Image: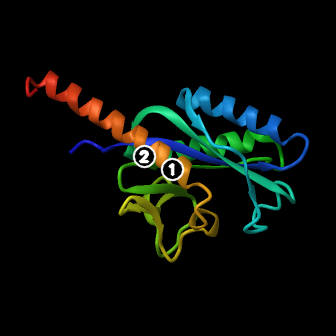
Amino acid sequence: MPDPWVKLIAGVLYPDDDGGERCFAWTLEKLKNLWGKEENVSSPVPFTITDYYRDIAPSLTRRFICFESLIEAGRLPDMKHAAIGVEAESRSPRIVNIDPGYVDGARLVLASTKDHAHRIYLRDGIFAEVTMRFRFGKWTRFDYTFPDFASGAYDDFLSAARSSWLRETRAHGEKKGRELGQT
């Protein structure tokens, strides 16, 4: 069975200071070189939920990027390893944190290098977490959903990525049907 097609996204944490937007622009260029043109970039959102990423900066901003085209879901570990490479390249110590994931019609999945009870091992040291689900016309949380995601601050961006996934999978399905003589 082939992998399902999903919409690649990435969350980027970067310093909320004078150089922060330059840092984000650098990261966006690096990711575009790896994953293709961006389709949508979210507005900046202050990241105040935790100080876990204080190694980057005392004050952080998060933005999301949705990339054009669909990818196969099984490529998520490769995307996470590529993101780790960009983080390492950003400087020592790192100045960005990149969380790749994907959106489809039902869920937001994020990649992680950290194991936990609610994460499933994929391969090559990478785990997947269904962070949120789309149900009854809105994004809903789980008991383990990160507080910033649970707050609803990213729902509009995620809904736009989901809508793009819906359009592209419909077009992809119609194309496949024509190729097989079924439409």
* Three-letter amino acid code of the residue under disc 2: Arg
Position in image of residue 149 (x %, y %): 58, 62
Which residue has dot 1 on it? 158
* Three-letter amino acid code of the residue under disc 1: Leu
Q: Helix, strand, or loop for circle 1?
A: helix
Left or right, residue 78 beside residue 3 = right
Query: Residue extending furthest right?
Result: 18
Left or right, residue 86 beside residue 58 = left
Q: Which residue lies at the image location 44% right of the left edge and 41% below the top edge?
A: 7
Position in image of residue 42 (x %, y %): 63, 43
Which residue has dot 2 on it? 162
Q: Quadrant of the C terminus?
A: top left
**Along the line of sight, which residue is nearer the eye, 156 or 62?**
156
Cβ atoms under marks 1 and 2 closer than 8 Å:
yes
Q: Please say whether residue 125 is visible from this viewpoint.
A: no
Q: Which residue lies at the image location 41% right of the left edge and 57% below the top edge?
A: 107
Report the number of discs.
2
Quarter holding residue 166 = top left
Left or right, residue 23 beside residue 138 = right
Query: Residue extending furthest left?
Result: 182
Q: Which residue lies at the image location 75% right of the left edge and 66% below the top edge?
A: 52
Position in image of residue 168 (x %, y %): 35, 33
Please, which colouring scheme is shown?
A: rainbow
**Along the line of sight, which residue is nearer the eye, 78 or 163?**
163
Q: Which residue lies at the image location 62% right of the left edge and 58% below the top edge?
A: 153
Depicted 34 relative to depicted 76: above or below: above
Left or right, residue 159 beside residue 100 = left
Q: Quadrant of the N terminus?
A: top left
